[in-house]
Image (cartoon, grey):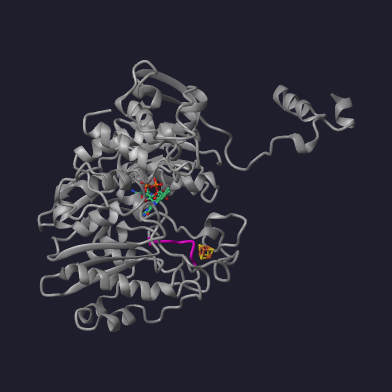
């Protein structure tokens, strides 16, 4: 390793050296992970019920629900888009309500029931909304699709539960299952391919009992 | 994101005392604003006190015919509450005009009031910003200021308070109830809650470190038609360029507060009587002393037109 340092380390050597031990004095200063001020990482136990299964994890407090799902539980169906709540790709259902899993810490969800795209349906037994997205071509590249589908499922529930929206003329009335309502309520899910009108068609299909 | 320890508070008094006892501690409610800022290291708390288990998630009617909203009531639950949507329509309308369905499910009443500015220079830690780093300067004043404030601003900061809900709370004369670190209760009128920046733009509001919001109280409903008119760069899921929360009584008496123009919801009660007689003169009074930049001067005429639109809708 000392030889490597003299001639300049390859990226691989530096990574391997870093992984072996921080005590290896021959690692050049620039290869050391920066020592940030503040506390050392804190780990906490987190229990979740994900897609019907109890999961026990030990996580850095900083772990978002999104990273817990993707990196720790290997449920990579839920996507990381912007990681700042702006795109909706990370949308999952928590206790039946849709949220952005990127703007929530895993430790905020002790005991919560989380449903991801993997839990809505399976390839042999698709959820009605998954089938409708296929039937209506509700995607192109597919990256935003898991978030779109989780959101779409929740939107129909929200309308049925009478939750008001910005496009209602009279917010004291129950909202209708209309195209305008679907569009407004899905605005937190951005689709770079622009599959919006087909997504609204898929939702109308499921809302009407079809698909 | 910097590392932090985490705990859940059991009572409001305990939450307040814990945060007050640690300089780097903060409350965590929904997390939709705080975590966003922590990822960018604009906020770097060393300890988070999660308030989600506190018994503050109900909406109750008060003896004088108003309502008392728990600090943890979600934006969705508040907008959907039967009494709010029928008797305080401006509040439902303002909430559903903000953020997205996903965010409103997680966002809380207190967290929404305390959301920080969306000034792009505040978000870019390479830029000078007195609000983020006191004394570093303000990159916005000579920068792109189209979204920023036109009134109530200072030479240190021209940012706006970005939220929608608080603009409705301002026309409704809401009161913010808190528990202070020594366990005492305090009531703050919404008009006095958010601060003008002056020379200390790092302080957005009058809360002291460790002071916990427990409730927001509304007086009895105000008769009339309720409106929230939000103008933004896209039809949904964008912050306001200008918004107007208005209540127009059957006799034409009008209350209006503007969003997107100032460091706090902007309302000038003294100008309201004139609105039904001479709207333009009234808006001129509301915005007298404004110091817009070349890029955002349009917000003043936009505010007047927003009010005109509300009045026209009330007549229809
Ligand atoms: C992409 C995006 C778009 C958005 N668009 C809009 C919009 O158009 N209009 C709009 O109004 N908002 C918008 N928002 C902001 C959103 O409304 C806020 O993020 C949300 O309301 C914050 O609530 P929270 O409970 O998640 O707060 P948190 O993030 O948990 O907390 C925010 C702050 O409040 C403090 N706090 C929380 N609870 C208390 C308490 N009880 N007492 C004292 N301090 C407390 C925290 O310490 C923190 O400093 C948007 C957000 C995003 C990410
Ligand atoms: S306007 Fe305020 S928030 Fe924006 S850069 Fe200047 S000091 Fe910072």
Residue B202 colored in magenta in the image: yes
Is residue A151 visible in the rendered image? The answer is yes
The residue shown at (48%, 73%) is: B154
The residue shown at (29%, 53%) is: B95
Q: Is residue B42 above or below residue B146?
A: above
Residue B263 colored in magenta in the image: no
- Residue B251 vs residue A186, the one in the foreground: A186
Q: Quadrant of residue B285?
A: bottom left
Q: Position of residue B281 (x, y in %)?
A: 29, 84
Q: Is residue A26 rendered to the left or right of residue A158?
A: right
Q: Quadrant of residue A109?
A: top left
User: Which span of residues is magenta-colored?
Assistant: B200-206
Q: Quadrant of residue B90?
A: bottom left
The quarter of the rendered structure image containing the C terminus of chain B is bottom left
The quarter of the rendered structure image containing the N terminus of chain B is top right
Q: Main secondary structure of the magenta part?
A: loop
Q: Is residue B66 above or below residue A31?
A: below
Q: Position of residue B77 (x, y in %)?
A: 24, 44
Q: Is residue B137 rendered to the left or right of residue A167?
A: right
Q: Is residue B275 above or below residue B32?
A: below
Q: Position of residue A77 (x, y in %)?
A: 46, 27
Q: Is residue A206 above or below residue A190?
A: above
Q: Position of residue B164 (x, y in %)?
A: 33, 58
């Amino acid at each position: 390793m000392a030889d490597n340092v003299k001639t300049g380390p390859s990226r691989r050597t530096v990574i391997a050296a870093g992984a072996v031990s921080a005590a290896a004095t021959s690692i050049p200063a620039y290869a050391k992970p920066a020592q940030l001020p503040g506390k050392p990482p804190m780990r906490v136990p987190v229990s979740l019920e994900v897609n019907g299964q109890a999961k026990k994890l030990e996580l850095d407090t900083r772990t978002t629900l999104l990273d817990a799902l993707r990196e720790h539980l290997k449920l990579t169906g839920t996507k990381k888009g912007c990681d700042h709540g702006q795109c909706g790709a990370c949308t999952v259902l928590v206790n039946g309500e849709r949220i952005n899993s990127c703007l929530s810490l895993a430790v905020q969800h002790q005991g919560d029931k989380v449903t991801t795209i993997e839990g809505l349906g399976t390839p042999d037994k698709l959820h009605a909304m998954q089938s409708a997205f296929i039937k209506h071509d509700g995607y192109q590249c597919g990256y935003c699709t898991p978030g779109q589908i989780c959101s779409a499922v929740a939107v129909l529930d929200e309308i049925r539960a009478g939750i008001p929206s910005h496009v209602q003329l009279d917010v004291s009335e129950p909202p209708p299952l209309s195209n305008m309502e679907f569009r407004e309520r899905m605005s937190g899910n951005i689709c770079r391919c622009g599959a919006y009108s087909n997504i609204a068609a898929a939702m109308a299909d499921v809302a009407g009992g079809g698909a | 994101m910097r590392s932090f320890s985490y705990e859940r508070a059991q009572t409001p008094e305990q939450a307040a005392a814990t945060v007050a006892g640690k300089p780097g501690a903060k409350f965590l409610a929904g997390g939709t604003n705080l975590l966003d800022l922590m990822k960018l290291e604009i906020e770097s708390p060393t300890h988070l006190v999660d308030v989600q288990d506190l018994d503050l998630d109900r909406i109750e009617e008060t003896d004088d015919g108003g309502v008392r909203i728990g600090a943890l009531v979600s934006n969705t639950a508040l907008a959907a509450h039967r009494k709010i949507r029928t008797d305080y329509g401006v509040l439902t309308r303002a909430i559903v005009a903000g953020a997205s369905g996903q965010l409103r499910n997680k966002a809380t009443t207190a967290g929404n009031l305390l959301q920080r500015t969306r000034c792009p220079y505040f978000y870019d830690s390479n830029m000078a910003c007195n609000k983020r780093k006191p004394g570093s300067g303000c990159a916005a004043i000579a920068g792109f200021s189209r979204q920023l404030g036109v009134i109530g601003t200072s030479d240190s900061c021209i940012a706006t308070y970005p939220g929608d809900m608080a603009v409705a709370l301002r026309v409704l004369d809401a009161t913010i109830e808190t528990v202070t670190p020594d366990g005492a209760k305090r009531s703050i009128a919404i008009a006095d809650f958010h601060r003008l920046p002056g020379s200390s733009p790092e302080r957005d509001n009058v809360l002291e470190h460790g002071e916990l919001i427990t409730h927001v109280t509304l007086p009895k409903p105000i008769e009339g038609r309720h409106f929230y008119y939000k103008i933004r760069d896209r039809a949904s899921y964008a912050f306001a360029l200008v918004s107007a929360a208005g209540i127009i009584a059957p006799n034409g008496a009008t209350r209006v507060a503007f969003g997107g123009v100032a460091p706090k919801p902007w309302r000038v009660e003294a100008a309201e009587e004139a609105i039904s007689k001479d709207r333009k003169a009234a808006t001129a009074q509301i915005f007298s002393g404004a110091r817009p930049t070349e890029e955002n001067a349009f917000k003043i005429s936009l505010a007047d037109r927003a009010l005109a639109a509300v009045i026209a809708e009330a007549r229809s």
